[in-house]
Image (spheres, rainbow, N blue to C red):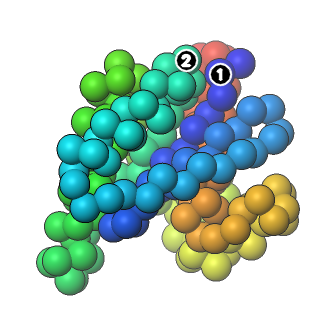
Amino acid sequence: MKRAIGVDYDSKAVHFSILSGERVSTIRYHLVESLGDSLDALVAQVKNFRNDYILVEAPIYIQNPKTSFKLARVHTLICVALEKAGVAYQIIEVTRWKRLALGRARADKQEVLEAMRARFGDIISDSHFADATAMCLAGKKLLEEAKDG
């Protein structure tokens, strides 16, 4: 079975959780000021994911326009890196991955963090890795549904 990879991000870093069977590993990629340098390094990172099932969180737009712009920029950077590396991916809405992974579309950050730590332990060091790992569980469900369908 393919590994499921969840991709969460903030304005300064990209957070990958990789679910292989019941084992999770995490990678944090810190962005640099130069978009070109960040893109090249991110392409090199994601080339290793060619045979995996990747879910990238859809951008969330908040009231602060500067923050929304920064998040949209990082989301675009991730998608361009995946495209450039020839890696297939799917964009998933927050409410969808929460419903698939936790059974509740409106779970808050703390609930997601606690659920992922309860299942996977201290490897889930923060809410970004918790979200990415929950996306992995959602991806695993989607893969099983596709196999059964």
> Percent x, y for residue 16?
55, 48
Query: Looking at the image, which residue is at 37% across and 66% down?
Result: 12
What label sits on residue 2 in the rendered view? 1
- Is there any visible trace of residue 86 in the rendered image? yes
| Closer to the camera in the image, 107 or 12 | 12
Residue at 25%, 61% (x, y): give it: 33
Q: Which mark is residue 137?
A: none
Which of the 4 quarters of the picture holds residue 66? bottom left
Most extreme residue toward the bottom is 64
Residue 129 is situated, as x and y percent measured from the top left of the image, at 61, 60
Position above or below: 97 against 81? below
Residue type (three-letter) at the residue carrying disc 2: Asn
Contact (Cβ within 8 Å) of mark 2 with mark 1: yes
Q: Secondary structure at mark 1?
A: loop
Give the quadrant of the C terminus. Answer: top right
User: In terms of depth relative to the viewer, which is nearer, 125 or 64?
Assistant: 125
Residue 113 is situated, as x and y percent measured from the top left of the image, at 68, 70
The residue carrying pointer 2 sits among few (fewer than 14), some (14 to 19) or many (20 or more) residues within 10 Å by Cα, namely few
Q: Residues within 10 Å of mark 1 (few under 14, many from 20)?
A: some
Residue at image point 55% right, 17% down? 51
Total marks shown come to 2
N-term-proximal mark, 2 vs 1: 1
**What residue sits right under mark 2 in the picture?**
51
Quarter of the image containing the N terminus? top right
Separation (CA) of disc 2 from disc 1: 7 Å
Q: Amino acid at mark 1?
A: Lys
Which circle, 2 or 1, is nearer the viewer? Answer: 2
Residue 56 at what x, y percent from top left? Answer: 42, 45
